[in-house]
Image: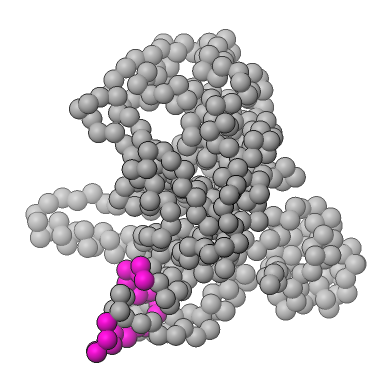
């Protein structure tokens, strides 16, 4: 059954942003005043006809009116609220939905407070350990990264003005499919930015620029795709620096560290948009049915760069398949996560062990496919690969990661990896993480959810040694 669409606060904000009173706005939409009032109060869902009328009258696309942001916010609230429980009852799902839909700014402030509390708690624990061991421990720097991840998360992993500008720079550079990328960017640096590229080998250097000599040093240990990306980073930093700073100014980041991280992230985003120009890449992705190997070869990008770019194709009027993209290290740490889907990532703990991304290590780059079903009954086609990043020296360890890319099964026909996969058959029943998973019958569960009671039978033992108390609401 299709979920009813309640978007009252968004409709009200769109109306008030145009200084429209209720009656003239209802007239423009072809609705009665009482009907529009009920929609804005979330007492009536929006029908397909009304949604189309709103898109026309407010001059916005469907993504500006969908409920995906509310779903993401509600999932984040549930996890944070579960973390904060003491002896009181947990908030019901209905209460969380009410806050996410009617007071999104309050919800985000609550999440900020929760993360600040968590950080302070971690510092106190670390300080206690340091005092006990008579050691000095640096403060955690995790929070700024989480703040930047939130910025991209709630931008739907797409920065419109920056993406358009980077595409224009790509056209000036002459970047395109099947054109030698590294040489093209090097020539642009030399002829237009008066920067000479020098190559060296050894160490962990990826890029260094000397303003005095106007020399950009790259490491030949890195593959050609990486060297091209580093040149693209320098180009967009030089040509789109003001636009990047403008994006930072409106991002609302609370710390200098977060701003510095976000500046790098926006530069990387723009570099990816230069190397993989939106319109050409989206067209090729559609024509090649999102075959990542073929796309990587055509645009001379790495496998990881191509996956990342696929997750950003959300330009209004020219949207691609909405993907999530994630990179995980062997310890299970999520080092990259981007999503244009409803797929939820754990924010304060480990991920679901049944998700196929954990199986990709040691599989020699073979593609793993999985049809997975989240607790909200949404099915995803999940793809996973293991990758190896060589250090260039026997004396230094290589880096290993697993990449995950996925989309809802409704888009699977456009993905070459769905061929031969039974999309309607049994699915892996995964969740966000054990700490907030709603499933009662998972044999892989590590521990009870933090917001659910449980009981341990005295005379009986199953694989999971406890049973969860039924949750109300």
Residue 27 colored magenta? Answer: no
> Residue placed at 30% from the left, 28% from the top?
391
What is the span of residues highlighted in magenta in the rendered image? Answer: 443-461
Q: Position of residue 275 (x, y in %)?
A: 57, 28
In the image, residue 9 sits, relative to residue 305, either above or below, namely: below
Which residue, as the protein is rendered here, is positioned at the far bottom? Answer: 459
Which residue, as the protein is rendered here, is positioned at the far front? Answer: 420
In the image, residue 214 sits, relative to residue 307, either above or below, namely: above
> Residue placed at 55% from the left, 36% from the top?
292
Q: Is residue 302 left or right of residue 408?
A: left
Q: In this view, does 430 lie to the left or right of 181?
A: left
> Residue placed at 62% from the left, 51% from the top?
412
> Residue placed at 33% from the left, 43% from the top?
362
Q: Position of residue 186 (x, y in %)?
A: 52, 14
In the image, residue 47 sits, relative to residue 18, either above or below, namely: below
| Dominant SS type (magenta) | loop
The answer to whether residue 245 is visible is: no
Residue 456 colored magenta? Answer: yes
Q: Where is residue 331 in the image (x, y as percent from the top left)?
A: 30, 50
In depth, the one of 251 and 401 nearer the eye is 401
Colour convention = one colour
The answer to whether residue 119 is visible is: yes
Q: Position of residue 156 (x, y in %)?
A: 59, 51
Q: The N terminus appears in which quarter of the rendering?
A: bottom right
Instruction: Give the quadrant of residue 210.
Output: top left
């Amino acid at each position: 059954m299709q979920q009813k669409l309640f978007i009252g606060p968004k409709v009200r904000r769109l109306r008030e942003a145009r200084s429209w009173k209720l009656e003239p706005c209802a007239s423009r939409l072809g609705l009665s005043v009482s009907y529009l009032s009920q929609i804005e109060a979330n007492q009536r869902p929006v029908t397909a006809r009304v949604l189309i009328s709103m898109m026309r009258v407010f001059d916005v696309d469907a993504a500006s009116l969908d409920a995906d942001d509310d779903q993401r916010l509600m999932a984040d609230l549930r996890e944070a609220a579960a973390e904060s429980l003491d002896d009181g009852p947990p908030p019901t799902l209905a209460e969380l939905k009410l806050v996410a839909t009617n007071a999104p700014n309050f919800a985000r402030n609550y999440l900020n407070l929760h993360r600040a509390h968590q950080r302070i708690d971690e510092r106190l624990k670390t300080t206690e350990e340091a005092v006990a061991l008579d050691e000095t421990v640096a403060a955690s720097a995790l929070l700024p990264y989480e703040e930047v991840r939130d910025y991209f998360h709630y931008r739907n992993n797409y920065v419109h003005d920056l993406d358009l500008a980077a595409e224009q720079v790509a056209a000036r550079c002459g970047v395109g499919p099947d054109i030698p990328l590294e040489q093209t960017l090097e020539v642009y640096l030399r002829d237009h930015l008066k920067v000479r590229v020098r190559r060296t080998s050894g160490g962990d250097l990826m890029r260094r620029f000397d303003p005095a000599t106007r020399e950009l040093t790259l490491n030949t240990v890195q593959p050609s795709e990486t060297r091209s990306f580093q040149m693209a980073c320098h180009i967009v930093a030089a040509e789109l620096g003001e636009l990047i700073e403008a994006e930072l100014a409106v991002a609302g980041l609370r710390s200098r560290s977060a701003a510095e991280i976000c500046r790098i992230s926006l530069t990387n985003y723009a570099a990816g948009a230069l190397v993989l120009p939106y319109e050409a890449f989206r067209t090729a992705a559609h024509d090649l049915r999102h075959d990542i190997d073929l796309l990587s070869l055509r645009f001379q990008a790495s496998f990881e760069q191509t996956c990342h770019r696929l997750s950003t194709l959300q330009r209004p009027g020219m949207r691609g398949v909405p993907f999530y993209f994630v990179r995980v290290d062997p310890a299970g740490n999520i080092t990259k996560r981007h999503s244009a889907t409803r797929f939820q990532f754990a924010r304060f703990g480990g991920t679901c062990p049944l998700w196929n991304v954990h199986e990709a290590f040691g599989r020699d780059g073979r593609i793993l496919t999985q049809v997975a079903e989240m607790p909200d009954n949404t099915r995803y086609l999940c793809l996973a690969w293991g990758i190896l990043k060589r250090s260039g020296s026997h004396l230094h360890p290589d880096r290993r990661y697993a990449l995950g890319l996925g989309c809802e099964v409704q888009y699977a026909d456009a993905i070459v990896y769905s061929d031969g996969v039974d999309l309607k058959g049994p699915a892996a029943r995964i969740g966000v993480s054990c700490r907030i998973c709603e499933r009662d019958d998972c044999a892989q569960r590590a521990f009870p959810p933090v917001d659910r009671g449980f009981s341990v039978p005295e005379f009986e033992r199953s694989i999971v040694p406890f049973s969860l108390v039924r949750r109300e609401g």
